[in-house]
Amino acid sequence: MFLPQPETNAGRAALDALLKAPRQAMAAFDFDGTLAPIVADPRASAPYPGIVEKVVDLAGLLGSIAVVTGRPAETAVHLGGLDRVPGITVLGHYGAERWADGRVVAAPAPPGVDVVREELPGLLDRLEAPEGTWIEDKGRSLAVHTRRTADPDGALALLAPALGALAERADLRVEPGRMVIELRPQDVDKGSALTALVAETGPRTLLYAGDDLGDLPAFEAVVALRSQGIEGINVCSSSEEATAVAKAADLVVPGPAGLAELLDLLIDALHGSPRG
């Protein structure tokens, strides 16, 4: 197999630039749905088999590697074994936390998180949330999952208005996702986190891979950075649950398995030995 080509001119230009000057490139990845398959219980998440090893190999070829996730940074590191990746930076909680060299740096959580933590269980009870609805407390945010319910989309539709109202009262924002609604701080997103990291590390080429609506700000950041002379390619780890992300991407791969194959082919191409 040969390295797949992006569908857009900008994506193709970025891939060519990455192959020509890999030490001037950064590769950044979402975690859930991208490096790791989506599972019913996020606490049981694990990377797609062999994909972290491919990221390790890629770290030896590129200038920098990052993971940008909505999870707490340490949680992603622990679940993914990401401390195996040399020099990796993990931006957690959409950029509010940073893990590097075994140390986490984070700003204090806004007071609205405590408001939501206190009120959310009672709100779900009053709404008679369907059986299987559950709350994930991420420390700096709270997420309401409906994947385990009989009708996940219907459950989200039932809960969304009240969750939006609660978020507004607590001065938080609502982050919709794949069978989940997250209530989180206003002042961070993956786009601003990625932009700040690029400004700090100075790559000339950027690859970002994500799968969900929360990754769209990062995709938009990649597009905006092109105007600053930074070549960029957006890769969607696709699913039928987030088609808007695929539409915004330069290259679409079939989920974490497809991303693992892409990384394998990219590593071969960087070594100058494409398979075929």
Image: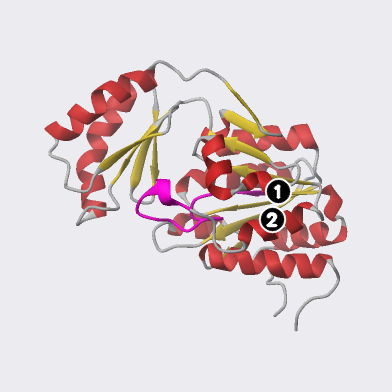
Instruction: Write down the quadrant of residue 4 in the picture.
Output: bottom right
Q: Is residue 39 magenta?
A: yes
At mark 2, the secondary structure is helix
Q: Position of residue 57 (x, y in %)?
A: 75, 58
Instruction: Estimate how packed mark 1 is, as few (under 14), some (14 to 19) or many (20 or more) residues with alpha carbons within 10 Å.
Output: many
**Disc 1 target residue:** 85
Q: Is residue 77 magenta?
A: no
**Disc 1 and disc 2: Cα gap in Å?**
7 Å
At mark 1, the secondary structure is loop
Q: Residue furthest top?
A: 111
Region in magenta? 27-45
The figure's colour scheme reads secondary structure
**Disc 2 target residue:** 55
Residue 206 placement, left or right of 91: right
Tag in front: 1 or 2: 1
Residue 70 placement, left or right of 104: left
Q: Is residue 63 positioned above or below 173 on the image?
A: below
Amino acid at circle 2 = Val
The overriding secondary structure of the stretch rendered in magenta is loop
